[in-house]
Amino acid sequence: MIPVTKPFLPPQEAYLKYLTGIWQRNWLTNMGPLASELEMKLKEHLAIDHLLFVTNGTIALQMAIKALDLKGEIITTPFSFIATTSSIVWEGCSPVFVDIDEASLNIDASKIEAAITVNTTAILATHVYGNPCDVVAIEKIAKKHHLKVIYDGAHAFGVKIEGKSIFEYGDIATCSLHATKLYHAIEGGLIFTKDSTLLKKLASIRNFGFNGPEAFAELGINGKNSEFHAAMGLANLDYIATIHQKREAITLRYDEKLRNLKARRPIWHSKSHNNCSYYPIVFESEDLLLQCMEYLKTHEIFTRRYFYPSLANTLPYLEPKDFEITDKVAKCVLCLPLYPDLSLEEVDLISRLMLRIQNN
Ligand SMILES: *Cc1c(COP(=O)(O)O)cnc(C)c1O
């Protein structure tokens, strides 16, 4: 059986090495030494000055919306994971969807201005599959209309634009460290902002809004993460080079073996690089996708329609709205198996089966 993804696990001893200290200190959570060490090492690894380690990528988004005190309408993409939209609704704001760009599969920056109203307070965009949004165009629009920008960088660990971390862009950027992501801490999330006042506020929000042991500065939540999660983050960080290498080798192999497949790939940001978080392909039709998906399934190979359906016309708590490109892409996109343990022989097998069904 070949699953679509499989969490990376470091050697058990590498994880246990970090656990010993937890038993010695009896300090399990509440920003302990391992959580602090992880924050420090991630700053170094990502070459970024400010970040916070939090419970998960969803809480990171909700804390971002809360900290920026956003109200009213937030412009966002209908082609993302549910958490991008649900966080907006959970924080009492209204998502206003803008169609995606057919080439990059990210929000189409040229369509954002038409969606701005007097109630718009922010843009929340996803770097889909780790492919950077048009950050320059989005910043320009945001400045002109006095909007805040949040980037959901759940897929974008390690991505840079011209050598600068993707997490430097936007008022706030977030990342997910969930088990299925490229780099993980079992569960976990990261929040980034260059604004030191905002960072302080986010740190306070993460800890119930505490300001000293008996005082509160503001409305907060429990956005902390534990020493056990930090330990997994630290252990995995020791293997990040291997993780990247293996994912890249698999991606290149798919590229080579599937070059004659009648399907396209997203077009990557010209000043960035693929971090090989996913291997998405866009078929010419939903029929072709379903044929391929079913055929692979008969060989115990599992793919995933990520993201399907569009967030704009399927959620029970939102008025449905159709978008030409998003609806088309969501129906035709399929993510192939991609994880460090996947062998190149398995990639060859998957590719062979896909070409066989296409040429049938
Ligand atoms: C995974 C994911 C999230 C949520 O992250 P969690 O850590 O699972 O809460 C948010 N946005 C996108 C685009 C994701 O893929």
Image (tube, helix red, strand yellow):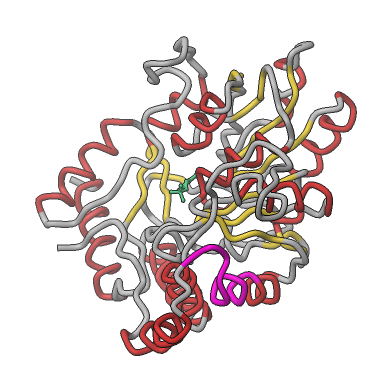
| Residue 310 position by quadrant | top left
Is 27 left or right of 40, judged from the image as shown? left
Is 8 left or right of 141, judged from the image as shown? left
Please provide percent x and percent y for residue 233.
Answer: 48, 72
Identify the residue shown where x is 66% and y is 25%: 75
User: Looking at this rendering, what residue extends furthest in the left direction?
Assistant: 298
Give the answer, above or below, for where 235 lies relative to 50.
below
Is 124 left or right of 113, judged from the image as shown? left
Identify the residue shown where x is 44% and y is 59%: 181
Please provide percent x and percent y for residue 36.
Answer: 62, 72
Give the answer, above or below, for where 340 lies relative to 149.
below
User: Looking at this rendering, what residue extends furthest in the front direction?
Assistant: 214
Please say whether residue 71 is one of the residues in the magenta stretch.
Answer: no
Please say whether residue 36 is one of the residues in the magenta stretch.
Answer: yes
Identify the residue shown where x is 69% and y is 48%: 202
Along the line of sight, which residue is nearer the eye, 237 or 283? Answer: 237
Along the line of sight, which residue is nearer the eye, 149 or 252? Answer: 149
How many circles with numbers are drawn on the protein?
A: 0
Please provide percent x and percent y for residue 150.
Answer: 69, 40
Identify the residue shown where x is 25% and y is 53%: 354
Quadrant in which the C terminus is drawn: top left
Dominant secondary structure, magenta: helix
Give the answer, above or below, for where 182 lies relative to 22.
above
Please provide percent x and percent y for residue 187.
Answer: 42, 58
Quadrant in which the N terminus is drawn: bottom left
Stretch of the chain drawn in magenta: 29-39
